[in-house]
Amino acid sequence: MKSKTRRLFKRLSLIFGAFVMFFTLSSCTKSFCSPLDNANQIYASFGDIYSFKQGSFDVDETTAVKNKNSIQADNVDAQNQNRKTLFNSLTGLNSTSYTYTFPSDVYLNYMRDRTDKFVDTYWEVFVNGKIASFTSNDEETAEQQARIMCKHVAIYAGFNFSGSSTDKDSVIGVSELFKNMDAWYADSLADSSIGSFYAPSAGFIKDLKLNLSSPTRSTTCITPESKSFNMNGNPIYIEGKTWGQAFKQYGFLEGLLVYPFSYIVHVISSSMPANGWGAILAILVVTIIAKVVTVMNTIFQSKTQSRQMKLQPQLAALAKKYPNSQTDPEQKRAMAMEQMQLMRKNKLHPFLPMILMIFQFPIFICVWSALQGSSALADGTWLGLSLTTTVSTCFSNYANTPGALTGIFIFIFLAISNILSSTTGLWLTSWRNKKFGNPTMGDTGGIDSNKTMKYMTYIMMIFVIIMGYSLPAGMGIYWIFGAVIAIVQSIIMELIQTRNRHKLALQNSAESELSAIRRSKHHKEKAEKKKKSDKPLWRK
């Protein structure tokens, strides 16, 4: 009992360690969203937080951007509703706190005036190349576009300056979120015409920022060119990032893998018609590129198994040399030592395939981050579904989610393909071990590496299905492609191994135990047919 418990503990520890590594790596990649991207996303959700109309916090329709082709058009109805819900949750009927002071009209007018002055002072930095270089088009002038972006920065971010001066020539970039909001709130408290009597409480400002920043959790900000992308029905302007920027500002994995994968998605998606099929092709290409690494690993495993098969006669000899190794501890230790010597001599390790599988996790995480972060995937729809829509939303909010049926079918195919992918590999391994013997080498400290791999495969299968329910549809499609490729890969590698087994059987003599074990029925029939065909036609 103790031995079984110890083996179970070791197996669970190994699996737990693998998943700890997986989730640790999953948190390594950073969001590519810049402060300007975040400000644009918040504005798309809430509009002008300081605007009001008879206390209802409605956008003044005379100033709202109506043109859908605008660099970032206002979705007035949705913004009004989001803003009302936000303020009601903080100070209205739905509030759970009674210590907040509601922002008065005097305070909101003050913040609106500061916003207008900020835009009048700094809008040119979005034209002269300081932050961007907007140019006039058929829909809007360069100044109109610049004022839109400057307003977003004024309300939800601010500027960083090269020195103590705060003029427009000293601007060097967009600052962290809510820089202006904090500074202007402090100014309002010091202003005798406002003060604490008209300004909201500090607790209100703190929770307001917390609720406003929730949309910035979106990581769909990787793009090599600055432009507006259609995200959930809203055109949102996203700053372009360079490869060097990915290394310097975001991290090594981001520059080495995440950005290149996302760049491939952008190029393919942008060069195809805007019907979503370009995005599907881009996901397929990225999946194939990522699978190259796993194919290399599979080839290595195949070669390792071929070496292990060649050692079977020596293993069989060891089994005869130590017939009581299962019950006699001394024989078991001696046999294990000789097995380890064979392994070292032939450069084999029973857990090497599993270790290599764990090292594939960074590739998986980086592809995951690239597809989730690609702005191009968010732009447009496929069969009516935005690829950034989560599958869970298609189930929970079916009536109000465009293309929800497509998302449901993606999840169904995701589950089926991953079950088939996992069971195909396990079935082939089980069939091979049953027919030709288990090639596992040496003492593994009481852990059956094949069983451990089996448990890890099942857990990964369940993990993928659960995560596929909560992740965007684009990731679901990636996993479907990956599962199909894995099935084909498993079948091809098994065919190669079968061919190697036949070669090995031919190389050994008829009296060889290995030849007897490895020679399949198919090989026997083939040999008999060959003998018959060698007979002269006149001979019976």
Image (cartoon, rainbow, N blue to C red):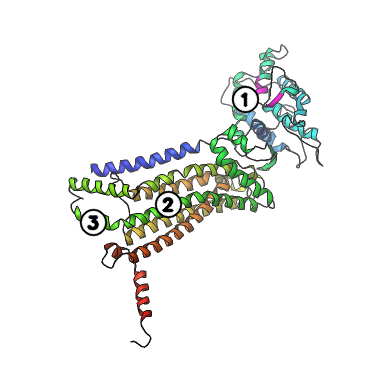
Tell me: residue 176, above or below residue 240.
Answer: above
- Can you tell which mark lies on residue 41? none
Q: Nearer the viewer, mark 1 or mark 3?
A: 3
With respect to residue 517, does 323 lie above or below?
Answer: above
Disc ID at residue 317: 3
The residues colored magenta run 171-182
Q: Bin the neighbour count of mark 2 within 10 Å (Cα to Cα): few under 14, some 14-19, many 20 and up.
A: some
The residues tagged by marks 2 and 3 sit, at their Cα atoms, a distance apart of: 27 Å
Residue located at (31% from left, 58% from top):
437
What is the three-letter code of the residue carrying label 2? Phe
Q: Does residue 521 appear to the left or right of 104 in the view shown?
A: left
Please report the residue visible at 37 percent of the width from the left and 76 percent of the height from the top: 530
Look at mark 2 in the image and give the residue it sits on.
300
At label 1, which amino acid type do we have? Thr
Query: Any mark on residue 91, and which?
Result: 1
Answer with mark 2 or mark 3, whichever residue precedes in sequence.
2
Say if 161 sits above or below 145 in the image.
above
Identify the residue shown where x is 42% and y is 52%. 300
